[in-house]
Image: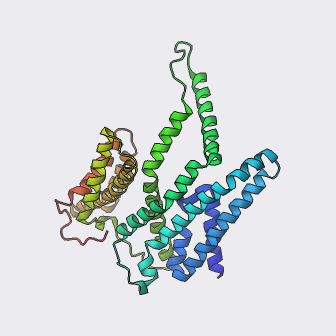
Amino acid sequence: MIEILVFAAVSTLLYRLGMGPLVFLVPLQVLYIRRGEKSFRWAAFVALVSIIVVGLLLTRMRTSSDALASAAASSLQIPSLVFELTVVVLMIGGLALIQLPEMNPDLRLPRYRRATRLVLATVIAGALSVPTILYLKDNEAFSSVIREFFDALVQATNSAINNSQTETLPGAVQPIQTETVLGYIGMVMRRTYLFYYFLILTFSWWLGTIIGARSMGKRPGLTRIVDFKLPDRYVWPLIASLALVVLNLLVPIKPLDILAWNALLIVAFLYGISGIGIIRFLLRRLNVRPRIRWLLIIAIVILAMTPRIGIAVLILIPGLGVSEVWLKYRRDERSNA
């Protein structure tokens, strides 16, 4: 029981330190690997309650000395609680869902490949998040706070731009409008939030599994990148989502564009991992030394973050992974995606 409380406390602390959903699942996954499903359930429940309670206490402490701030905070308590509860429940639920066949073998659930489970968990989380998104969108208190924050940010940015303009270029830069910023950020968030959920869930499961296994002196048993392959059927959601994205450039197809962009990013990411696996496989076939292979992979990652060149890399690497549907680079290897 002490270990359960410790891991739940670490999860709560990581969340409240500002890291949010990025890493707070990792201690829960470590505990699952070390102690199994029952300990995971208790730690997840304790972490969920602790995160919400601590959040409410911090809100009260920050506003107790200011009546005006206290009134504003009280109007935000419910939407903030709904938002936080949704995020934490969907993250913990997703972590449990991708391991449900192992947690409850008596249910005799189909043992899909891990990549498929992660995609299914993301789809379910997206569907369950719709009511919360609609509620927050229509909540005046929540919307006004968001608008005030971006108003202050835009004013500070415009002030900095005006101060930096030279006398020879008066009025060369048009002031930024809050509505424009909100519209752009809203568009980006709608088209990427499921993709980011997928990335966070995947990273938390992967890192927690490695740490948990290593802490017990065992091998994690995860598929190596060089062996990672996607089933050929994954090319169809890639084609469909890409077609919808292109169609949306010609004719607005809301809200299908949201699903299309998120699906395209998720499947392209998986094919990118497969593409990196192909590169490592070919380098190993060419007897390139392990140290050189790692340097080349690091160089590819750096190039992917470089302006202009990065766009080409981010297209070519997933494209290499997709090409394996027709060109069987690793014909003698088993698919373990």
The answer to whether 257 is drawn above or below residue 2 in the figure is above
Whole-percent x and y of residue 303?
Answer: 36, 45
**Which quadrant would residue 23 be assigned to in this image?**
bottom right
Residue found at x 53% / y 12%: 168
* Residue sitting nearer the eye, 286 or 223: 223
Q: Residue furthest bottom?
A: 106
Q: Position of residue 162 (x, y in %)?
A: 59, 22
Relative placement, left or right, of 253 versus 15 is left
Q: Quadrant of the C terminus?
A: bottom left
Q: Is residue 153 visible?
A: yes
**Residue 150 drawn above or below residue 331:** above
Q: Quadrant of the N terminus?
A: bottom right
Q: Is residue 233 left or right of residue 222?
A: left
Give the image location of residue 227, x and y in percent: 29, 68
Q: Quadrant of residue 274?
A: bottom left
- At 45% from the left and 83% from the top, the residue drawn is 104
Q: Is residue 44 left or right of residue 50?
A: left
Q: Is residue 36 visible?
A: no
Expressed as whole percent of the image width and height from the top left, the position of residue 122 reads 43, 62
Colour scheme in use: rainbow
